[in-house]
Image (cartoon, helix red, strand yellow):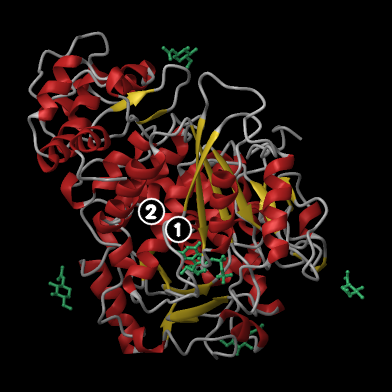
């Protein structure tokens, strides 16, 4: 898109308009839908001004409109005061917050839009995505339970009380410094889960969500090791405090060394019988090794009786590359609480990810510029996430064949016509924007050429876009992970999603977007699997390395068969995922 053309400028920076045909809200380059007055007002503005007004005014307008759904907005100083997106918002959601809150400042909460999931009390400019994300998403069909909301508010209070450099934090750190062993008499107000930054970005997002849920269940405070780039990628999720572990935390230099054999790991302490409920002394910290190479002793952590043992330890230092939430649902003591928190079980990651992961302003810029430039105008957005677990990045012919076999079979993409003219001359062709993400550019180029060189049978116009092709994983590069995060997020904003088996990158996109993707099954032997893809039964991520152990009988068991809402995954037969038992099965 040529951003210098004035007409484009206006359009791309302007109207957020609701499609007449459906309930989704999105930006749309369609001058005819913008009221004339607004158009002329906007033409007189520079691009920057327009954008600035958008950013500042939209949340304001939105909130005003929510409070007074029937009152016409008389303030026309903000060019597009009539933006029709506002009228389609569910009026019901007004009930959530008191009116006064929302009239007073532009630093207002968007509680309503995420059903009260997000806490007020943030400076808007410090994290634009928190307040603007809802403008890019469809109205959520999944409401968080009021119990979840109250637990989140309690958690926020706890975090404020126990967060970095509070009196309680200082005291607990002091104790950690002063020795390895503490007495059960020492009562400490605050206990912690420390998350070690580890593995690819998709993995990290899944493990932070898992660690946070574990913290909520055990009344602990979650502190995030900033690693190389966590603060560069994410906003602070909790008001008036920080979730980042201070750099002077005593054990920080050991984080990289922690591994399966670390003496202070839970598994090793259990093996050596160094923990028991009758003991009067406890280690001041435990290392929880929940990485895919963990052993049977490490896995005991998911058992109720073992939870009792670790509950006394003030510092739990966790390293994981797994979405271990499904195993928490198998524990009787957590299970009950979890059912109250998530009556719809398959919405755990959906709600937690929307609560926790707000792209930083830099990443939000990558997301919104891309969305507005390439995706907003299309009638339909299709995401195709290609992750190939091979030694070389590719592209591979069998993967290309698989993508086409899947998308054509499920009518995600239209067939191409061998004739020059489309068979059915469509008076109003549908435009579809296909967002491809992959480390390689080969699949994207193929698709784009295919729909340029040939007409579609349906007459649909297919635009194919790929934001980046980084060729290989480059965790050291700042912009690399910013782009990875932006791409996961952009995928989550699509209407139809196709993802790759085994990829946490795809799980994040599906969970954040509330989408049940078609998942491209893992090819064996460089051949297209049959079927090439499956529609997943829930939007939850898959736990790739679950224990196969029944804590009750203390023997091996198929953990995918213990309760109906924890099942094996579509893309990994031994993995576990949450499903809604009433949902479309
Ligand atoms: N920008 C971009 N980066 C990608 C893409 N696919 C993979 N990557 C990079 O590779 C990393 C893959 O790690 P994860 O995000 O954990 O995803 P995963 O698919 O589960 O891969 P593994 O961790 O290797 O199992 C990402 O963090 C990115 O850095 C892509 O489509 N776009
Ligand atoms: C308001 O919510 C109720 C149920 O919660 C629903 O039946 C009704 O259609 C909603 N009204 C609007 C205008 O969305
Ligand atoms: C906690 O300790 C830090 C220094 O380590 C200090 O700056 C801070 O004031 C202390 N907090 C309180 C509440 O005393
Ligand atoms: C309890 O733990 C202590 C070490 O903390 C150990 O010496 C003792 O043998 C354990 N007792 C039992 C019954 O396992
Ligand atoms: C893989 O391909 C080889 C040769 O093409 C064949 O002999 C082998 O049986 C295949 N393996 C599987 C698991 O399909």
Quadrant occupied by the C terminus: top right
Mark 2 touches mark 1? (CB < 8 Å): no
Q: Earlier in the sequence, mark 2 or mark 1?
A: 1
Q: In the shown orientation, is residue 8 left or right of residue 500?
A: left
Give me the residue at 54% from left, 57% from top: 445
* Kind of element beneath mark 1: helix
- For this rendering, which residue is in front, 84 or 163? 84
Q: Nearer the viewer, mark 2 or mark 1?
A: 2
Residue sitting at x 58%, y 36% = 343
Foreground pick, 291 / 488? 488
**What percent of the width, then of the height, locates residue 366?**
31, 54
Q: Which residue is mark 2?
A: 357
Classify 210 as above or below 184.
Answer: above
User: Residue 132's x, y, as percent?
Assistant: 29, 40
Residue position marked by numbered label 1 in the rendering: 212
Q: Quadrant of ligand 5?
A: bottom right
Q: How many numbered circles are shown?
A: 2
């Amino acid at each position: 898109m040529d951003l210098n053309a004035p007409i484009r400028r206006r359009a791309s920076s302007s109207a957020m308009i609701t499609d007449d045909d459906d309930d989704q809200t999105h930006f749309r380059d369609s001058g005819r839908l913008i009221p004339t007055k607004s158009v002329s007002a906007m033409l007189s503005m520079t691009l920057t001004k327009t954008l600035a007004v958008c950013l500042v005014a939209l949340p304001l307008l939105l909130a005003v409109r929510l409070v007074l759904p029937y009152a016409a907005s008389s303030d026309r100083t903000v060019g597009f005061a009539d933006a029709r997106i506002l009228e389609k918002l569910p009026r019901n959601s007004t009930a959530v917050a008191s009116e006064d809150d929302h009239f007073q400042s532009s630093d207002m909460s968007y509680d309503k839009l995420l059903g009260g999931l997000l806490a007020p009390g943030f400076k808007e400019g410090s994290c634009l995505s928190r307040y603007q994300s809802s403008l890019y998403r469809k109205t959520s069909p999944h409401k968080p339970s009021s119990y979840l909301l109250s637990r989140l508010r309690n958690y926020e209070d706890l975090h404020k009380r126990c967060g970095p450099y509070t009196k309680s934090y200082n005291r607990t750190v002091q104790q950690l410094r002063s020795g390895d062993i503490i007495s059960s008499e020492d009562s400490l107000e605050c206990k912690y889960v420390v998350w070690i930054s580890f593995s690819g970005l998709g993995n990290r997002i899944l493990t932070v969500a898992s660690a946070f849920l574990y913290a909520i269940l055990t009344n602990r405070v979650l502190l995030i090791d900033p690693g190389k780039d966590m603060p560069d990628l994410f906003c602070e999720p909790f008001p008036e405090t920080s979730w980042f572990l201070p750099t002077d935390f005593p054990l920080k230099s050991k984080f990289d060394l922690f591994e399966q054999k670390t003496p202070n790991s839970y598994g090793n302490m259990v093996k050596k019988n160094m923990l028991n409920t009758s003991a009067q002394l406890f280690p001041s910290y435990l290392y929880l090794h929940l990485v895919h190479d963990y052993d049977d002793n490490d896995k005991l952590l998911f058992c109720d009786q073992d939870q009792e043992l670790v509950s006394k330890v003030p510092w739990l230092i966790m390293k994981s590359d797994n979405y271990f939430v499904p195993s928490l649902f198998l524990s009787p003591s957590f299970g009950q609480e979890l059912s109250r928190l998530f009556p719809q079980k398959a919405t755990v990651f959906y709600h937690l990810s929307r609560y926790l992961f707000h792209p930083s302003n830099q990443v939000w810029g990558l997301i919104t510029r891309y969305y507005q430039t390439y995706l907003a105008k299309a009638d339909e957005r299709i995401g195709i996430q290609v992750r190939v677990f091979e030694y070389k990045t590719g592209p591979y012919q069998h993967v290309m064949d698989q993508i086409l076999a899947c998308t054509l079979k499920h009518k995600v993409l239209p067939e191409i016509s061998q004739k020059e003219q489309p068979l059915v001359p469509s008076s109003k062709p549908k435009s579809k924007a296909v967002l491809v993400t992959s480390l390689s550019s080969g699949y994207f180029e193929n698709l784009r050429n295919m729909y340029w060189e040939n007409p579609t049978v349906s007459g649909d116009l297919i635009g194919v876009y790929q934001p980046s092709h980084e060729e290989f994983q480059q965790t050291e590069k700042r912009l690399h992970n910013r782009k990875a995060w932006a791409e996961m997020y952009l995928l989550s904003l699509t209407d139809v999603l196709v993802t790759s088996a085994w990829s946490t990158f795809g799980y994040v996109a599906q969970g954040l977007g509330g989408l049940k993707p078609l998942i491209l099954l893992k090819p064996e032997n460089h051949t297209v699997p049959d079927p090439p893809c499956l529609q997943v039964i829930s939007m939850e991520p898959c736990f790739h390395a679950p224990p196969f152990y029944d804590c009750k009988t203390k023997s091996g068991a198929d953990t995918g068969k213990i309760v109906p809402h924890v099942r094996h995954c579509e893309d990994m037969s031994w993995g576990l995922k949450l499903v809604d038992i009433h949902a479309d099965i």
